[in-house]
Image (cartoon, grey):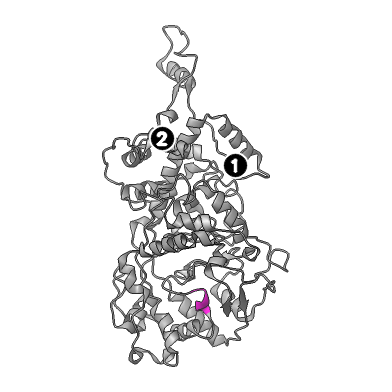
C-alpha cells in the first residue's frame, strides 16, 4: 500500500517561483481543457447506483465506488500543439514505414525490434536488446500518446522528441540523424511522402559537383557506366557519412566520437538543414504512435454496465456494457484494488496511472539500495534537450507543455523515482518494472504484498509502503482483475508491420513553415 506525502509537482520535479506561478497555473488549465471539451464530461464520473453493484462490491464505501466510476470511459486523446503534423494521416503513414525500417540502424535494427506488434509493442525481455543489452526494460508504446512524460524516467516530453534517442543510442539502434535524412532523401517513395507534407528537401542537402568540376577527360570509348561512376565519385554529398552531435559531455564510444567529428566538419547551414529535416521526420514517428491506442477492455464493459450506460463511444470495440465482463474473481480483485490494497494511490483514473514519479524502494544491482538515478538525471536531460517542447523545433514553445519543461527543477528526492506505468494492457507486457525484474504479474503482486526485495527509503522518500498480508485467494483475485484491463488484439492496420500505401498526393509549395526559410527562422531564434 502506498501513501503519498508530497505534491505531484514535486514528484515531477517542478518548482515554480512566485512570479511565474499564475502564468503556469493558467497554462496548465489550458492544457487540461485542450484534452477536448468532451473530456469535461468524464472529469466528474457519473454516479454508480448501488442497486447495480454485484455482491463482490457491495461492501465498498462511496469513495471507493467513485474510484471505480473514474476507471471508464477514457477521455479523448489530447492534442499535441508541439507537433503540427501530429494528426496528419500522411505523416502517420511515413512514420509507420520508418518504424519498421531496418536501414535506420547499421546493425539492421528497427524500432519494432524492441517494440514488436506481436508482443504488444514490447520485446518481452527483461532488458531491451538492440545493438547491445540496454539497462532498462522496453515499455510498450501502445497508449504512449496519453502520457505526459515518456520513458521510465520521463526524460522526454513528446512522442516526436523521444524518437531520436533510441535511433542515436549506440546500445539501442546505433544510428544517426544524418543517415536518417539520407535514407528518406534517397528513397523515392519516402522522399515523395516527405515532400508531400513538408515541401521540398532543403537545397543544402542535395548532391553537387566537387570543386574539380566536370568529369576528367576520358577517351571516347569510355563506357557509360564508367563515366557514371566517375561522375558519382565527384559529387559532393553532405549526407554521405554518418554524423551527429554528442548529446552531452563525458565518455563516448569511438564510433560516437567519429560521428561527432564528421558533424563538426559540416558547415552550419548543413547542420541546421539536417536538424530541420530530422525533426520533421521525428514528428512523423510521433503522428504514427498517436494512432497506437488500445481498444476497450473488459473493465470498460463492466463500468459501463454499472453506470447503466454504453461502452466508451471512442473505442472501436463494439461489445455491449456487461456486468459479466468481469468474473467473480476479477470483481473481488477490483474491490481490493480500490480499497485495502491501496493500488489507486498511484494507478488511478481511466488510464490507471497518476503520470507521476515514485521511488518504491526496489534494490539496485548491489542488492541493497536503489542505484538508478532515474528522474533526478532526467530533469537535466529534458531541460537541455534542444528538441523539447520549449525549444526552437517545437511548434508551440510557449504552450503549457513548454512552460512545464521550463518549470522543472532538480531536487534530491527525485533520486530513484520512476514514472508510474499505465496498467491498461498490463497482462500482455511482461516482464515488469523498469529493469524487468519480475517475470509475471504474480511476482509483482507478491512484491507489493510482502515487500521482499525492497530497501528502506531515506528521508527523501515520498511514499510509504506497507505489507498487505494478502491470502493466496486475494492475490489470485488481484491478478484476475489486472488481466481484465487488457483487450484482444486490435484489427487496426496501424498495429501491423505492413499496410496499404497512402494514395499519392501532390507536393505542396515550400512555405515559411518548411525548408530553407524555416532554417533561417530557427537560426534567428
Q: Taking 191 as reference, is 234 above or below it?
A: above
**Picture coordinates of residue 433, whole percent (x, y):** 58, 67
Q: Can you name the residue that lies furthest to the front here?
A: 19
- Say how many tags the image has: 2
Q: How many C-alpha atoms fall within 10 Å of the one at disc 2: few (<14), some, or many (≥20)?
A: many
Residue 185: mark in rendering: 2
Q: Taking 338 as reference, is 164 above or below it?
A: above
**Picture coordinates of residue 465, whole percent (x, y):** 62, 78
Taking depth in this image into account, of 206 and 27 the one nearest to the observer is 27
Residue 350: mark in rendering: none
Could you tell me which residue is drawn at 47 percent across and 76 percent down?
482
**The residue stretch that appears in magenta:** 343-347
Could you tell me which residue is drawn at 62 percent across and 77 percent down?
464
Which residue is under mark 1?
Answer: 246
Judged left or right of residue 316, residue 153 is right
**Picture coordinates of residue 324, whole percent (x, y):** 35, 83
* Residue 85 makes an appearance in the image: yes
Asked if labels 2 and 1 touch by Cβ distance under 8 angstroms, the answer is no
Provide the secondary structure element on which disc 2 rests.
Answer: helix
Q: How many C-alpha atoms fall within 10 Å of the one at disc 1: few (<14), some, or many (≥20)?
A: some
Judged left or right of residue 157, residue 455 is right
Could you tell me which residue is drawn at 29 percent across and 37 percent down?
507
Instruction: State the separation of the CA atoms marked 1 and 2.
Output: 23 Å
Q: Earlier in the sequence, mark 1 or mark 2?
A: 2
- Dominant SS of magenta comes to helix
Per the image, is 186 magenta? no
Could you tell me which residue is drawn at 38 percent across and 69 percent down?
488
Say which of marks 1 and 2 sits in front.
1
Amino acid at each position: 500500500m502506498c501513501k503519498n506525502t508530497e505534491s505531484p509537482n514535486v514528484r515531477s520535479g517542478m518548482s515554480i517561483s512566485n512570479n511565474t506561478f499564475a502564468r503556469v497555473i493558467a497554462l496548465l488549465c489550458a492544457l487540461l481543457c485542450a484534452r477536448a471539451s468532451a473530456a469535461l464530461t468524464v472529469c466528474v464520473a457519473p454516479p454508480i447506483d448501488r442497486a447495480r453493484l454485484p455482491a463482490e462490491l457491495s461492501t465498498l464505501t462511496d469513495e471507493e465506488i467513485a474510484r471505480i466510476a473514474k476507471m471508464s470511459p477514457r477521455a479523448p486523446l489530447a492534442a499535441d500543439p508541439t507537433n503540427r503534423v501530429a494528426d496528419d494521416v500522411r505523416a502517420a503513414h511515413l512514420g509507420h514505414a520508418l518504424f519498421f525500417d531496418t536501414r535506420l540502424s547499421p546493425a539492421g535494427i528497427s524500432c519494432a525490434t524492441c517494440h514488436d506488434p506481436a508482443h504488444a509493442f514490447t520485446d518481452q525481455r527483461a532488458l531491451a536488446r538492440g545493438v547491445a543489452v540496454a539497462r532498462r526494460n522496453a515499455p510498450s508504446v501502445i497508449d504512449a500518446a496519453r502520457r505526459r512524460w515518456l520513458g521510465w524516467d520521463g526524460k522526454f516530453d513528446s512522442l516526436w522528441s523521444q524518437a531520436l534517442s533510441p535511433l542515436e543510442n549506440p546500445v539501442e539502434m546505433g544510428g544517426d540523424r544524418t543517415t536518417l535524412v539520407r535514407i528518406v532523401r534517397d528513397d523515392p517513395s519516402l522522399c515523395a511522402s516527405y515532400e508531400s507534407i513538408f515541401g521540398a528537401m532543403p537545397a543544402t542537402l542535395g548532391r553537387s559537383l566537387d570543386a574539380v568540376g566536370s568529369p576528367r577527360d576520358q577517351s571516347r570509348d569510355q563506357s557509360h557506366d564508367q563515366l557514371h561512376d566517375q561522375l558519382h565519385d565527384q559529387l559532393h554529398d553532405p549526407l554521405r557519412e554518418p554524423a551527429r552531435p554528442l548529446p552531452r559531455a563525458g565518455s563516448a564510444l569511438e564510433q560516437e566520437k567519429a560521428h561527432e567529428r564528421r558533424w563538426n566538419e559540416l558547415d552550419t547551414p548543413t547542420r541546421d538543414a539536417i536538424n530541420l529535416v530530422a525533426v520533421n521526420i521525428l514528428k512523423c514517428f510521433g503522428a504514427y504512435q498517436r494512432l497506437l491506442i488500445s481498444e476497450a477492455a473488459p473493465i470498460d464493459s463492466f463500468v459501463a454496465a454499472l453506470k447503466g450506460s454504453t461502452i466508451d463511444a471512442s473505442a472501436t470495440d463494439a461489445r455491449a456494457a456487461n456486468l459479466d465482463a468481469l468474473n467473480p474473481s476479477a470483481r473481488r480483485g477490483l474491490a481490493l484494488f480500490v480499497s485495502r490494497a491501496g493500488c489507486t494511490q498511484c494507478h488511478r483514473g481511466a488510464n490507471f496511472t497518476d503520470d507521476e514519479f515514485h521511488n518504491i524502494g526496489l534494490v539496485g544491482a548491489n542488492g541493497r539500495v536503489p542505484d538508478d538515478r532515474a528522474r533526478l538525471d532526467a530533469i537535466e536531460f529534458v531541460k537541455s534537450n534542444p528538441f523539447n517542447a520549449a525549444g526552437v523545433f517545437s511548434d508551440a514553445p510557449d504552450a503549457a507543455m513548454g512552460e512545464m519543461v521550463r518549470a522543472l527543477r532538480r531536487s534530491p528526492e527525485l533520486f530513484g523515482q520512476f514514472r508510474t506505468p499505465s496498467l491498461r494492457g498490463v497482462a500482455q507486457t511482461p516482464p515488469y518494472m523498469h529493469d524487468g525484474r519480475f517475470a509475471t504479474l504474480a511476482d509483482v503482486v507478491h512484491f507489493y504484498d510482502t515487500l521482499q526485495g525492497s530497501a528502506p527509503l531515506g528521508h527523501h522518500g515520498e511514499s510509504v509502503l506497507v505489507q498487505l498480508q494478502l491470502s493466496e485467494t486475494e492475490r489470485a483475485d488481484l491478478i484476475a482483475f489486472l488481466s481484465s484491463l487488457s483487450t484482444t488484439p486490435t484489427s487496426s492496420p496501424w498495429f501491423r508491420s505492413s499496410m496499404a500505401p497512402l494514395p499519392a498526393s501532390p507536393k505542396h509549395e515550400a512555405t515559411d513553415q518548411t525548408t530553407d526559410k524555416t532554417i533561417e527562422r530557427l537560426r534567428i531564434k
